Amino acid sequence: MIAPGSRLLPATIPFRFLTAALLFHLLGWTALAAGAPILAASEGGLGLPVAALHLMTLGVLTATAMGAGFQLLPVAIQADLPAVWPCRLASWSLLPGIPVLAWGMMTADLWLLGIGGSAVALALLLFAGIVGLALWRADTAKPQVRLVGRYLWASLACLVALAVLGLALLGDFAHGYLDDHRTVSVVHLAVACYGFLGLLAAGFVQVLVPMFALVAPQPERPVTIVLVLAVAALALAGVGAFVPAACVGLGGTCLHVHGMAGLMRRRNRRDLGTSFLLIRLSWAMLPVSLVLGLLLALDLLPARGGGLFVLAIVVGWLLSLVLGMLQRILPFLSAIHAARAGRRIPKVSELGDDLMLRIQAACHVGALAAVGGGMALDLEVLIRGGALAGAAGAAAFIIYALDLYLRIRALPRARPVAAKEGTIP
């Protein structure tokens, strides 16, 4: 059991997920570059583009959500996790399951699809159980804890639906029992991105943005209204009413982005670095993704509209947000764990090379623009070039993380503070 009041997990728990996320980020862009001819020629079905998509959604977004979530959740809701071993078990199931599932999607191997999909589903359900038990013990008398808890409960409900829908889709490839595979796939995408990942992110940003920007959190009422609209939109999408779902979701999104913009105007820390450039990009791409979804539901987009919608929601919104937050979370957690290990607390200048982060951010923006342009114009070379730019950015982020690790390892041991006369040493 985790000792009561001890809310810092062993370093191996969060960092195994975050390290895997950085590697899957590189693999995802590389798979998309290799699958550019398929992406430019057709839509749907198994293959490299679908494998690349799941390397991003599961390998980067979900792995980051679990790694950062396990560490940040006790702080956000001020309640300890029930135990450490389920976190390790979730990692043993998720991290090997993702490449097996992706390989099965790439090769259309039904056995690998089943094995990888089952392992990932097990990890997701373990995550839901761990977070649910922690939420059950949280002190909801505190407004901020109550607010975050509402978002996380809604996210967990979507997570369970996501696991069930994902297994149903994988089974349909083998047995063909779904009447409309495409519609179920769209619902699966909406529940995964806007539901599980989106609501989880929206809950944690209520804590992370005020912490990093040094600003008071939002009032409870407008944030709750956003949650109600988001849940209503997801319910409408779940029954196939995509047009009203997009309209309701767009209303909630505008309120959410307006609230985040208000925090940025009131912040006390003016220089937020490249991380918040990516985070601001994510806030801009969230309504863009819903507008594309609405146009797609109204059949007003060209043949490549579906791909543009997926790109906007996964790369434009979620990946931009996660990469921006990772630029802050990695050095933050590294400094905390260095202090826990008895090393001197590092200065900001000792926490890595900002040049690598600027390169990573520039490559991400370039990749988003190039791949989007390549999809719109049906240009394979532009898609491949954008994916390779994304891979270069992923490599820069890995170099930054390695440099950060070496810097932390090189920190000297903290000097013990001499005991004052009359005090207990």
Image (spheres, rainbow, N blue to C red):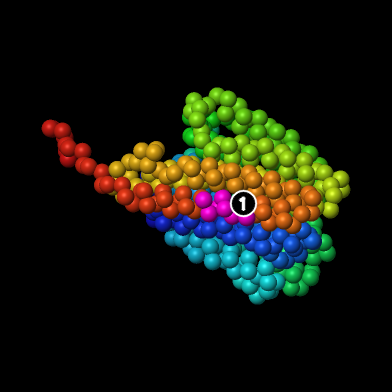
Quarter of the picture holding the C terminus: top left
Residue 365 lies, with reference to residue 130, above or below; the image says above
Residue 114 lies, with reference to residue 22, above or below; the image says below
Q: Quadrant of residue 369?
A: top right
Q: Count neighbours of disc 1 (C-alpha within 10 A) and say few if under 14, some if 14 to 19, many if 20 or more.
A: many
**Apparent side of residue 181 relative to residue 326 in the rendered image (left or right):** right
Determine the residue positioned at 43% across, 53% down. Answer: 402
Q: Residue furthest right?
A: 299
- Please state which amino acid type lies under the numbered disc 1: Ala
- In depth, the one of 72 and 126 nearer the eye is 72
Determine the residue positioned at 79% across, 61% down. Answer: 41
Residue extent of the magenta highlight? 388-396
Main SS of the magenta part reads: helix
- In depth, the one of 56 and 142 nearer the eye is 56
> Residue 329 in the image: x percent, y percent?
48, 44
Q: Which residue is mark 1?
A: 389
Quarter of the picture holding the N terminus: bottom left
